[in-house]
Amino acid sequence: MEKIKIKIEKEEEKRVSPWSWVPSLYLAEGLPYVIITVVSVTMYKRMGISNADIALYTGWLYLPWVIKPCWSPLVEILKAKRLWIVLTQLFIGAGLAGIALTIPLSFFFRATLAFFWLLAFASATHDIAADGFYLLGLNDKQQAMFVGIRSTCYKIATIMGQGLLVMLAGYLETSGIGLSVAWSITFFISAGTFILLACYHHRMLPQPLADESHSPQTFRAVVREFSSAFHSFFKKPQILTALFFMLTFRFSEAQLLKLISPFLLDSKASGGLGLTTAEVGFAYGTIGIIGLVVGGIIGGISASKGGLKRWLWPMTLSMLLTSATFLYLSFSQTDNRLLIHFCIVIEQFGYGFGFTAYVLYLMHFSKGERQTAHYAICTGFMALGMMIPGMFAGWLQELLGYKHFFIWVMLSGIVPLVATALLKIRTDE
């Protein structure tokens, strides 16, 4: 019987190539996240919402990723992950269409935020199902081979969202059809993309035997196991130091991220750089992504050769580049597009290189029994560390102005340095 099962699994692997679904699956995972957390900021800025309101209300949108470990058992026991993937992609497509329909309304801010909330929960659920399906749909060798592919495709989703979609909206803005119509069309195109992705994955995703519907009567057992996972997580050595690091490593970046687009779009008189929507999309969708990818690749190669302990401090310090570049731009307010693009490349490189240390530490801390559950909990704390600082960033910027705000963000970089200094990592990591 076991031989038959292995034979069926091998035939399934031959029939469905991972190249036919892994890249598209992680495009579908990354795109809604960047739309919800980044593209929404640009849209609301162009629609006249204040920086304080943008940062506060879009900051709350991180919450579903913070608490997603709380409903991850449901994805395990209710139907197959393959079905969850297709259903959540259809739901995301419908939610994006809802945003497109409500943008022209007089109460668009509240209406679109409601849809963004629904999208955030659907996207977080899709993440759980997609990451779980990746482990079930590939064998160990394939998982190792495609880990770089999935990361690259996630970054390509960043290009599509932060770059191409924003560029499209900017082009439509200048065509004379109006701001609201321009952004509505952009979101309708996004909605259509997800409907197509759902149809594609319904046909192309493999059907591994391990990805079967579970019986509802196992719910209590799963809840007990889940509670045990949380209990064991908080019993880990150095848990308080680890939590402080997880929550504060991105303290400076979380504040910066919410004000990058407003700063680039605001007029010179308001302390910004006065770029157009299309220019911001081009800067991050083409030039910036080069720095991000190069930084990530160099970070991965460096860490694989020297280990986390050796590269932890260089990578942590490189995160300061993200603040330093915008501190310079806020004081210079240069019109030189080449210089602006260069600063954005440096900022994205610093983030791509530095963030490697953060991910490696989460993996390092999660090692041992219940590694998957512990890593999910770690990512929840990572999202919380992004949500809270980002929420008050807009209010703080309006209080201080861009120049003093970026000084504050630069000084905030001291907090992750303290958190890093408190860590104790074995030499072999």
Image: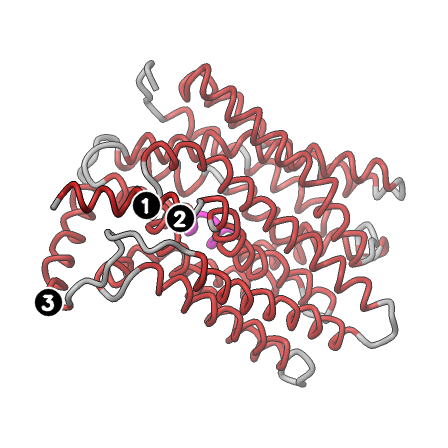
Q: Could you tell me which residue is drawn at 14 percent across and 64 percent down? A: 219
Q: How would you rate the neighbour count of disc 3 (Cα within 10 Å): few for under 14, some for 14-19, many for 20 or more? A: few
Drawn side of residue 193 relative to residue 238, left or right:
right
Q: Could you tell me which residue is drawn at 48 percent across and 54 percent down? A: 29
Lower sequence index among marks 1 and 3: 1
- Disc 3 is placed on an element classified as helix
Q: Could you tell me which residue is drawn at 57 percent across and 55 percent down? A: 34
Q: Are marks 1 and 3 in contact (CB under 8 Å)?
A: no
Q: Is residue 394 magenta?
A: no
Residue 11's disc number: 1
Q: Are marks 2 and 3 in contact (CB under 8 Å)?
A: no
Q: Most prominent secondary structure in the magenta stretch? A: helix
- Determine which residue is flagged by label 3: 217
- Determine which residue is flagged by label 2: 15
Q: How would you rate the neighbour count of disc 1 (Cα within 10 Å): few for under 14, some for 14-19, many for 20 or more? A: few
User: Magenta region: which residues?
Assistant: 383-389
Q: Is residue 386 magenta?
A: yes
